[in-house]
């Protein structure tokens, strides 16, 4: 158990809909990362927050947005869903200070299926 | 992002040591070498990381070349549970972010 909690574990929704994925980082971790993994793309970095502020953006679509709340949990909002958005979405968290030597811990992921 | 090169796949036998190589010839002085692994349908799992010196933990050892242009992850006694995709990643703080950038990784098969 990494200590990173993601909900829901599985989600099936229709095209055009909007979903919210939730992540609770490890206790005390200030950084939260979101990744997308689909069969043909591998693990793609989406976005990072550090103590409530956006720190880095990767290959995140404009239809997607995220935020980190004062209690450090994070949400990833996916809207106008398309079939190609079907993927495993991972949240990860790391240390009390932002440092490349910190370990990043991943959650078990949220399976999103768009039909 | 600094690039690493790994074999696409490797095979090993259960209870034997296995050495997983990684080349990173463009590594910079502040890049940390991280190894993660991922079992099917699970989140990536931290294995080990290092900067310059060899590192040991309960899961594995990391041997880093003196010039830091390559490293080797060593699993001392492979088990079936070690069958996974292994990622060798150079991690640096860039633009204020220390995110991990995953490549294609290397699939390890462990034969009983």
Image (cartoon, helix red, strand yellow):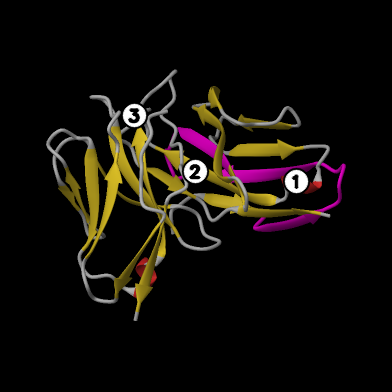
Q: Is A20 contained in the magenta span? A: yes
| Distance of label 3 from label 1 (alpha carbons) | 34 Å
Relative to A57, residue B82 above or below: below
| Distance of label 3 from label 2 (alpha carbons) | 15 Å
The residue positioned 66% from the left and 38% from the top of the image is A76
The residue pinned by badge 1 equals A84
Where does residue A45 sit, x and y in percent of width and height?
54, 36
Where does residue A102 sit, x and y in percent of width and height?
33, 37
Figure quadrant of the C terminus of chain B: bottom left
Instruction: Report whether A101 appears left or right of A72.
Output: left
Nearer to us: label 3 or label 1: 1
Return the residue nearer the eye: B97 or A75.
B97
Q: Secondary structure at mark 2?
A: strand
Where does residue A44 sit, x and y in percent of width and height?
56, 40
The residue pinned by badge 3 equals A99
The residue pinned by badge 2 equals A92
Dot 1: chain letter: A
Q: Secondary structure at mark 1?
A: helix
Please report the bounds of the magenta region as a residue range: A8-35
Relative to A62, residue A7 above or below: below
Where does residue B45 sit, x and y in percent of width and height?
41, 54
Dot 2: chain letter: A
């Amino acid at each position: 158990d990494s200590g990173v909690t993601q909900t829901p574990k599985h989600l099936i929704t229709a095209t055009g809909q909007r979903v919210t994925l939730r992540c609770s980082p490890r206790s005390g971790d200030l950084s939260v990362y979101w990744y997308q993994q689909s069969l043909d793309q591998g693990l793609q970095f989406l976005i990072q927050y550090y103590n409530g502020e956006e720190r880095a953006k990767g290959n995140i679509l404009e239809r997607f947005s995220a935020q980190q709340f004062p209690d450090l949990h994070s949400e990833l909002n996916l809207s106008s869903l398309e079939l190609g958005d079907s993927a495993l979405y991972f949240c990860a968290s790391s240390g009390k200070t932002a440092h490349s030597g910190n370990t990043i811990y991943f959650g078990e992921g949220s399976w999103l299926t768009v039909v | 992002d600094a690039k690493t090169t790994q074999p696409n796949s490797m095979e090993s036998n259960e209870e034997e040591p296995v050495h997983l190589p990684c080349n990173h010839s463009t590594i910079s002085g502040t890049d940390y070498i991280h190894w993660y692994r991922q079992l099917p349908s699970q989140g990536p799992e931290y294995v080990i990381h290092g900067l310059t010196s060899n590192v040991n933990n309960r899961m594995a050892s990391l041997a880093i070349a003196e010039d830091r242009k390559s490293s080797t992850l060593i699993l001392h006694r492979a088990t079936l549970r070690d069958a996974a995709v292994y990622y060798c990643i150079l991690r640096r703080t860039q633009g204020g972010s220390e995110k991990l950038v995953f490549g294609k990784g290397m699939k390890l098969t462990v034969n009983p």
